[in-house]
């Protein structure tokens, strides 16, 4: 589940940018790599950031292949609290759309691709489905995506997945405590939020009232990328593992759920954002990064 804890990707120089959004809030971007040639957006998972090992790994790999990368850290994930009560959620495509549109305007004529992991992959695929043939991206890759958020939330409350869920919930609780006054102003019951011991309970207490959903199930229904996959109109690769411990196999889409532009590569093993082989951590081969690089390099040729 945590093979990236052992990896030591090559360090690349990072240029930060604070991007001001139309509502007055901001997201922090991290640029890396050459300022010409193909440009690839990166979108991290829940409570991820520019320090997440899977991000540092793919960033290093793509930069070495001649790509410039720009990581969009979701609101509040860069280590600096965002200005507004609104943070981010699994189906939140507004900030992605605004950032992509602005960078497309600033860099006319450049090839634009994107890679999204877990929550970031769900949001990326939903964005692509919403945009259809109007997408400003030429190619996309999504990894370990929670196609059905309701089933994923229930799966995270079972077995060893509960340990991972609690780790993330502790981080989310800390942010709630930090922004208690702001969140109360949009209808969040802080006591209920801090008592939550499952994603469903947290989403019911925090995400639903903050973003105007009726309840957690309404949020899951409207934010899952599954129903949007048939509307994607650019070449898109989805990499998923059948043994992903945070999702159920019945949530994995079938061929009839996908548009002709979407390819799903399902491996029997790989866990959640894992996809590593080798006899031991010190001699591991992180083939996920190699597969992404091959896909995007081929797309730009």
Image: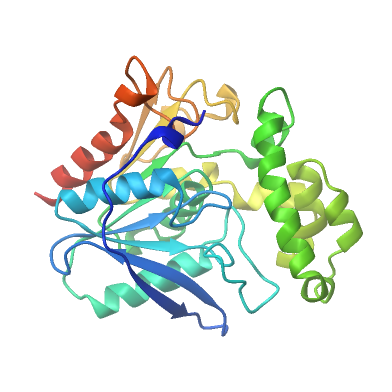
Q: Hey, which quadrant is residue 180 in on the image?
A: bottom right
Query: Quarter of the image holding residue 175?
Result: bottom right
Q: Is residue 77 above or below residue 117?
A: below
* 105 with respect to 54 (left or right): left
Q: Tell me what residue is drawn at x 29 percent, y 29 percent.
A: 287
Q: Residue at x 52, y 65 (%)?
A: 78
Q: Residue 15, how many percent across, how many down?
A: 31, 70
**195 left or right of 162?**
right
Is 189 situated above or below 292? below
Residue 301 location, x and y as percent?
8, 49
Residue at image point 37% right, 68% down: 100
Q: Quadrant of residue 265?
A: top left
292 or 226, nearer to the observer:
292
In the rendered image, is residue 179 in sight? yes
Give coordinates of residue 90: x percent, y percent. 59, 52
Residue 140 visible? The answer is no
How many labels, in total?
A: 0
Q: Nearer the viewer, residue 52 or 273?
A: 52
Q: Is residue 43 left or right of residue 297?
A: right
Measuring 45% from the left and 65% from the top, which residue is drawn there?
96
């Amino acid at each position: 589940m945590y093979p990236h804890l052992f990896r030591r990707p090559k360090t690349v120089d990072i240029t930060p940018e604070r991007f001001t959004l139309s509502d007055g809030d901001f997201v922090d971007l991290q640029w890396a790599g050459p300022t010409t040639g193909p440009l690839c957006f990166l979108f991290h998972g829940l409570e991820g950031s520019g320090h997440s090992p899977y991000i540092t790994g793919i960033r290093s790999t793509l930069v070495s292949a001649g790509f410039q990368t720009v990581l969009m850290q979701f609101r509040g994930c860069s280590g600096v609290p965002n200005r507004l009560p609104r943070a981010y959620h699994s189906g939140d495509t507004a900030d992605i759309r605004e950032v992509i549109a602005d960078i497309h305007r600033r860099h006319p004529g450049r090839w634009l691709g994107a890679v999204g992991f877990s929550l970031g992959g769900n949001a990326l695929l939903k964005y692509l489905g919403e945009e259809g043939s109007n997408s400003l991206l030429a190619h996309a890759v999504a990894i370990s995506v929670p196609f059905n958020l309701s089933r994923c939330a229930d799966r995270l409350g079972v077995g060893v997945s509960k340990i991972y869920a609690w780790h993330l919930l502790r981080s989310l609780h800390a942010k709630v405590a930090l922004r208690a006054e702001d969140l109360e102003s949009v209808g969040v019951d802080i006591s209920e939020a801090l008592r939550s011991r499952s994603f469903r309970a947290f989403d019911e207490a925090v995400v639903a009232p903050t973003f105007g959903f009726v309840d957690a199930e309404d949020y899951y229904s409207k934010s899952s990328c599954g129903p949007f996959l048939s509307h994607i109109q650019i070449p898109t690769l989805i990499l998923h593992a059948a043994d992903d411990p945070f999702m159920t196999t019945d949530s994995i889409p079938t061929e009839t759920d996908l548009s002709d532009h979407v390819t799903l590569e399902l491996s029997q093993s790989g866990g959640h954002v894992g996809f590593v082989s080798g006899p031991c951590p010190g001699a591991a081969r992180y083939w996920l990064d190699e597969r992404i690089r091959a896909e995007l390099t081929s797309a730009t040729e």
